[in-house]
Amino acid sequence: MVGTMASIMSATIVNVAIPDMSQHFALGQERAQWVSSGFMAAMTVSMLTTPWLLSRYGYRRTYEGCMWLLLAGGVAGGLAQHFPLVLIARVAEGLAAGVVQPIPAIIILRAFEPSEQGRASGIFGMGVVLAPAIGPSIGGLLVDGLGWRSIFYMVVPFCLVSLWLARRYVPTNAPGGAAADPRGATLDWPGLLLATVSTLCLLNGLVELHGGSAGQATVLLGSAGLGLLGFVMLQRRMLRSHQRQVDGAVAPLMNLSLFADRRFAMGSIVAFIYGIALFGSTYLLPVYMQMGLGLSASYVGGILLPAGLVLAVTIAIVGRLTDRQPTHRLVSIGLALLAASFALMVTIDLNRPGAIIPLLVSWAILGRVGLGFILPSLNIGAMRGLQHTHIPQGSSAINFLRMLGGAAGVSLCGIVLEWRISAHGFRLDTASTNPARLIAFNETFLMLAAVCALALVAALRLREHQTGRQ
């Protein structure tokens, strides 16, 4: 939990420092944004390597290696005198954070009995969500008081504590109880290369679609589609060779046979769509409050802080329910509440200024309660039907799809928002509190509500077989 808090904090808190960093290095907004997009791209792709690293080096060495890399990235980013070094440090942090992300679900499913897994997931989630809930507020104070470099050093104490805890508590074996084998299977380098190129083409294509050249966007998105097709074909061929135990066969980076399990397949779809809604709303809400409602940045932080604290409490409560209630019910309730929170944003009216803040706080809390129903139950429920030996691959795949959905969600919200603002005759880069301007934001929120409703269809198919829980 402590290590995941460090990785999540490194992902989110640096956004507070981007304006000061841009000024220090004399960067444009597009180049400064590489600090976030470089981290996200590295984190998304490195998730796929977690099963291989765990089988080759075991839990402890993999985890400690990630914490040392995360710590080194934080220190290097804080000391860097040139922007390319800052970017390299962020990519290093992203690689470490991506490998760490799937590990908690693997440990929870292996270290706890089925009757305790939900409770463990709830306690774990409660701690983890406090990092993004409180981090930006602390980060803002640090930037104002000590400068942007102090943001990078925030991960250092978390990394040091997690390294001490890992040395004391994390086992050295690989998943399943087998000893780690440093001379084990070779990494699927062709698959990793295809996944990396496809992800970068997708992210850059969406950025170009957002505010660049339509021709470049088409080429990049087409390349991403071809790369994805090639990745799937390669993984299927490698899986067949591996199952036939062909000499020299390399285990595939993503085990596509896992998607034959209905619950895992539906859970993966929900995770992808949920990533779109979660990360898209994380981008859209602050823009809406500042550009649409004319609120200051400090007001935005104050409005979102109670929702973050409510999320932590909700996760702890729902975690206990996960052991007694079916997954599809909890995930469906969460998606319905999340969709309602987006749809209800249209009730905010600039002609009733006294109601704006209470409604914003209420709808933000409603959405976070919805997230609290989804987070502890989705991963655990989707992977309960998998064999123990497939859990690392399952956790890696479902986290990869969630992050890929998140990266797409940010761009999707930006594209739809710019399109609707342009259609209504406004511009996104100029603040305005004209009531007609809110129509474009409301339409974007309704799009997110529709995305959540779409995920509900897949969530209902998470229902377990009538023969009982697996």
Image (cartoon, grey):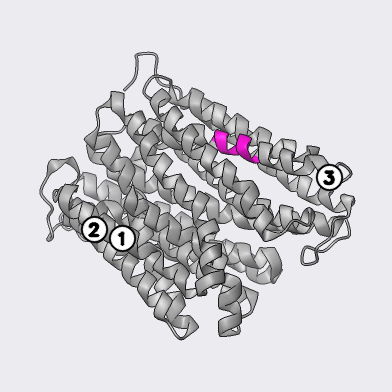
Among the two numbered marks 3 and 1 on one chain, the one whose residue lies closer to the N terminus: 1
Question: Taking 73 as reference, is 291 above or below it?
Answer: above
Residue 189 appears left or right of 341: left
- What is the quadrant of residue 394 in the picture? top left
Quadrant of the image containing the C terminus: top left
Question: Which percent across, then down, holds residue 351?
Answer: 89, 44
- Kind of residue at disc 3: Pro
Residue 369 among those drawn in magenta = yes
Residue 114 appears left or right of 442: left
Q: Nearer the viewer, residue 156 or 87?
A: 156
| Residue at the image point whose x is 53% and y is 50% from the top | 405
Q: Which secondary structure class fits the magenta region best?
A: helix
- Kind of residue at disc 1: Cys
Residue that carries the numbered disc 3 in the rendered image: 353
Q: Nearer the viewer, residue 217 or 451?
A: 451
Q: Residues within 10 Å of mark 2 (few under 14, many from 20)?
A: many
Residue at the top extreme, as displayed: 467
Among the two numbered marks 2 and 3 on one chain, the one whose residue lies closer to the N terminus: 2
Question: Taking 450 as reference, is 298 above or below it?
Answer: below
| Residue at the image point whose x is 45% and y is 71% from the top | 150
Please give the range of residues in magenta.
Answer: 364-370
- What is the quadrant of residue 452 in the picture? top right
- Kind of residue at disc 2: Leu
Q: Nearer the viewer, mark 2 or mark 3?
A: 3
* Measured Cα–Cα span from mark 1 to mark 2: 6 Å
Residue that carries the numbered disc 1 in the rendered image: 159
* Measured Cα–Cα span from mark 2 to mark 3: 49 Å
Residue 273 among those drawn in magenta = no
Numbered circles on residues, count:
3
Residue 222 appears left or right of 384: right
